[in-house]
Image: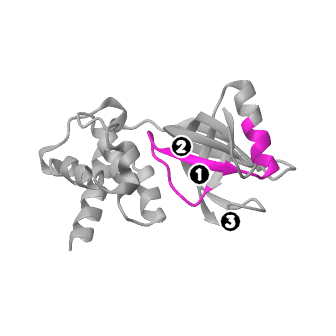
Amino acid sequence: MKHALFPLNTVLFPGSILPLQLFEQRYLTMIKDCMKQQTGFVTVLISEGKEVGAAPKIVCTGCYVEIIDWESLSNGLLGIKIQAKHRVKLSNSSVRDDGLLLAETSPIESTLDHNPPMPPAFKPLPDTLKQLLEHPFATHYKDNVDFNNTADICYRLSELLPISNKQKQLLLEAETAEQMLDQLALHINVLQT
């Protein structure tokens, strides 16, 4: 299926919620089309370039998102709130005349989708997440994390850990729960030293 792309300088994970202010015509048109067709779009990390202006270079894995709220802001811009639903792989990308990026998308299947049990070696990860949720930047997730769901723990840790976008992108691309858990444990160990 072909979707519109919204390149960002941040990585979203399933369950991520992000407010956006829109002012570029291509994205206003995209949102209007999404609302009319009752569909979402795909957020994707910029590998080279900027969020504003010419179409940037992007990575090949992103998140399909849906619009969960919108409003006209006091500054005259359109404000939307999006929530990431699932990871997708991109192919056959193209650029429309107005600069909007489009790509074929296919959902990424992962062992995380089947809520595997948390392996004993990774039992400290939920406690680390609970500590991160005490910080003001994470308050909107405080009561919205399912600590019985390994995927939810992995995705929230991936989003909230103070690591680079490149490292977050590698987490997003992890093919199995074990790969993601291993990467998360390594990042946490480095941050604690």
Residue most extreme to the bottom: 193
Mark 2 vs mark 3: which is more N-terminal? 3
Q: In the image, which is nearer the foreground, mark 1 or mark 3? A: 3
Q: Which residues are magenta?
A: 8-31
- Residue identifier under label 2: 63
> Residue at (81%, 53%) from the top-left corner?
99
Helix, strand or loop at mark 3: loop
- Residue identifier under label 1: 44
> Residue at (16%, 51%) from the top-left corner?
124
Total marks placed: 3
Residue most extreme to the right: 97
Quadrant in the picture for residue 153: top left
> Residue at (37%, 33%) from the top-left corner?
113
The percent position of residue 56, horizontal first and vertical second, equals 70, 61
- Say if mark 2 contacts mark 3, CB within 8 Å: no
> Residue at (51%, 40%) from the top-left corner?
84
Separation of marks 1 and 3 at Cα, in angstroms: 12 Å
Mark 1 vs mark 3: which is more N-terminal? 1
Q: Quadrant of the C terminus?
A: bottom left
Crowding near the residue tagged with mark 2, few <14, some 14–19, many ≥20 C-alpha atoms within 10 Å:
many
- Say if mark 1 contacts mark 3, CB within 8 Å: no
The percent position of residue 109, horizontal first and vertical second, equals 44, 35
Give the amino acid at mark 3.
Answer: Lys
* 15 up-or-down from 114: above or below: below
- Say if mark 2 contacts mark 1, CB within 8 Å: yes
